[in-house]
Image: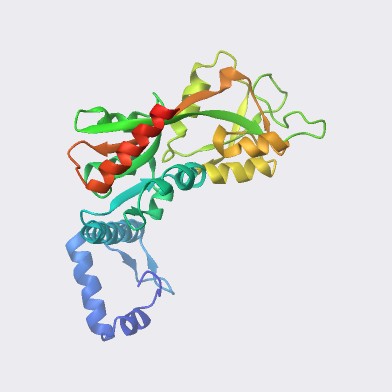
Amino acid sequence: MAACRNFSRAAEERNVSQPAFSRRIRALENHVGVQLINRETLPLSLTPAGDVFVTQARMMLQMHDDTIERCQAIDAAGENVVRFAASQSLYTTYYKTHIASLVPEGSLSIDLNSASWPADKFVNALQQGYCDVILNYWHSSMAYLAPLEIAQFEYLSLYNDQLVPVSKPAPDGSAMYQMDFQEKLRVPLLTYNASSAFRPVVDALLHIHPKVPKTLSVSQNALANSVKALISEGFGLGWLPLRMCASELASGELVRAGGPSWEAELDVRIYRRRENKKAPLDELWEKLTADQGDD
């Protein structure tokens, strides 16, 4: 109905008669206690309450589908497969070179949906047993990771990275936008939204720095790759993990847009439940631990 805006067409799509479909809608409105459809407009329209109901209903259906998907994934994986989740930036900068090669073929199952998960979903997925390990950035400002600091979880620190401000270069090779000096115009920031792991880190840098130039947030994204693409096009200044932009900094395609005081140290960690004793997970953990010893 929300898509068709017409009772007859909506009834046809549901393979019921129009009177029966109308009775169902009326029964739904009676159950909710409010009018959901404005019948005085042509085509029909949703009332404000109807808009809210449709939005929430879609979210509940998506949650239902996600729950079924998780249950099926857990059942399919069994005891011989490690279910792995990571952010998009870590999939593209670390997973293939340092994780995938450490486990036998077929014993690691990656969830590519996790590339776009909000930051706190990684914690929930590990707590609920949807995945066996998560690969994540860590910084003291990332409060959502606090539940993983308790005894039932353990982690390995795999390497250190930095979150650095970068910009497209100006014609003279300097940064087009800078954080280290006051400009007449506001500095356009390409930053992260509330679902990103990097949002609290950038907020902390802006909060504690003694000299913050005038800024204007021109975009907020969940994914570092999206921020990087906009920076490369010259739309503003943004923060990226150093490993993600090292080649562009070396070639001059991007340049640093602030000194050390505008950078944050990041720890890249892999987390697991201590009680999870899957053989391939223990094998992976041992190899990662040995790699640390070789560094």
Report the quarter where the N terminus lies. bottom left
Towards the viewer: 27 or 213: 213
Q: Residue at x 76, y 28 (%)?
A: 174
In the rendering, at what x and y percent does residue 26 appear? 22, 71
In the rendering, at what x and y percent does residue 239 appear? 56, 32
Residue placed farthest to the top in the image? 210
Residue placed farthest to the right in the image? 172
Towards the viewer: 20 or 56: 56
Please indicate, yes or no, whether residue 278 appears anywhere in the rendered image: yes
Question: How is the model colour-coded?
Answer: rainbow
Please indicate, yes or no, whether residue 222 appears anywhere in the rendered image: no
Residue 66 is left or right of residue 243, and the answer is: left
Towards the viewer: 45 or 236: 236
Report the quarter where the C terminus lies. top left
Residue 151 is left or right of residue 181, and the answer is: left
In the rendering, at what x and y percent does residue 252 appear? 73, 36
Towards the viewer: 28 or 246: 246
Q: Residue at x 47, y 48 (%)?
A: 96
Image quadrant where residue 157 sits: top left
Image quadrant where residue 134 sits: top left
Residue 254's place in the image compared with 184, above or below, is below
Residue 268's place in the image compared with 212, above or below, is below
In the rendering, at what x and y percent does residue 2 appear? 37, 69
Total residue callouts: 0
